[in-house]
Image (cartoon, rainbow, N blue to C red):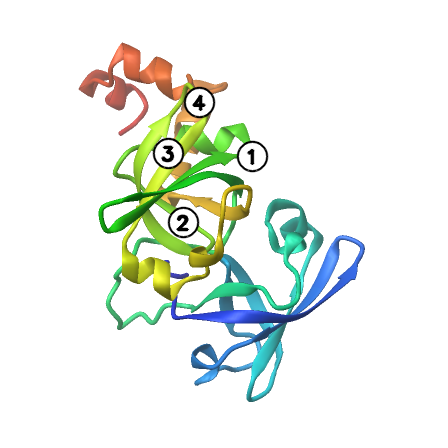
Amino acid sequence: MFTGLIEEVGKLQRIESRGEALVVTVSARKVLEDVKLGDSIAVNGVCLTVVAFNGSGFGADVMPETYRHTNLKHLKPGEPVNLERAMLAGGRFGGHIVQGHVDGTAVIVSRTHEANAVVFRLRPEQAHLLRLVLPQGSITLDGISLTVVDADRTSGTLAVSIIPHTLAETALAHKQPGASVNVENDILGKYIDHLLHERHGGPVPAPQAAYASGLTEAKLREFGF
C-alpha cells in the first residue's frame, strides 16, 4: 500500500520486451536505502516487485496484465519515473490510500498556468474511469496523490491543480499535452460502486443520472448503507 507522495524521481535505465511481458531496470537512490528482494516499489503508480538490485538501481518484472492496463509499455530508456516505497504502518499518512493497482490511463489534453499552480486537464482512455471521479475527490496520476478540481461529464475530461513543489519533485514536470499517465481511482469509490452494482443487480445508473435524481437517506438504506 502507498500514499501517493512521491519519494524521488528515478530514471528508466533499460526495458526489455518479451511480447506483453517486460523487464524494467530503474536507476534510483532514496528508495534503495533499505530495499530487499521482494519489496514493493511503485513506478509511475504501478506496484512492482523488486527482483534484483544494486547500489544504483533495481529491476522488476511486468506481467501482461500490467502491460495492458498501464503506460509502462510506452516508456523509453532515459525517461523519468515517479518512485515510492510501500508505506510504513507507523508513518504519517500524507496522501490517500493508494494500492498501486492501476485502473487505466488518461491523456493530457492541456497544461495551463493559474497563478502559482499548473492545471492539467486529462481525458481518460477508458470511459468507466470518469464515473468514479468527483470534484474535491482523490485520484492518483502516475502514482501522485492529487485532488480533482473538475470532472466534466460532457467533454469526458477531468482536471487537477498542481502546486509548484509537486511539479518540481515529480516526473509530471516533464509531461506535456498528448502524454499518457496511469490512473488509479479512489479505492473507496471503487468498492462503493461495486457494492451498488451487486445490490442493484445490474449496471449502476450513470453518475449524471444519480446527480439529477438526488441521493437520499432512503436510497442509502435501500442499498445497505
Q: What is the number of the mark on residue 140?
A: 2
Residue located farthest toward the right when viewing the structure as drawn: 19
Specify which label sits upstream in the sequence, 3 or 2: 3
Q: CA distance from mark 3 to mark 4?
A: 14 Å
- Which residue is at 24% across, 67% downward? 92
Mark 1 packing: few (<14 Cα in 10 Å), some, or many (20+)?
A: some
Amino acid residing under circle 1: Glu
Task: Pick whichever of labels 3 and 1 is earlier in the sequence.
Answer: 1
Q: What's the amino acid at mark 4?
A: Ser
Q: Nearer the viewer, mark 4 or mark 2?
A: 4
Q: Is residue 32 placed above or below 26 in the rendered structure?
A: below
The spot of residue 146 in percent (x, y) is 33, 49
| Label whose residue precedes the other's in the sequence (4 or 2) | 2
Q: Amino acid at mark 3?
A: Val
Give the foreground label among 1 and 4. Answer: 4
Does 68 sit above or below residue 31? above
The CA distance from mark 4 to mark 2 is: 20 Å
Left or right placement of residue 196 versus residue 80 in this view: left
- How far across and down, in percent of the image, does residue 151 sit? 35, 30
Within 10 Å of disc 2 (Cα), the crowding (few <14, some 14-19, many 20+) is many
In the rendered structure, which amino acid carries the disc numbered 2?
Thr
Q: Residue at x 25, y 61 (%)?
A: 94
Residue 133, numbered circle: 3
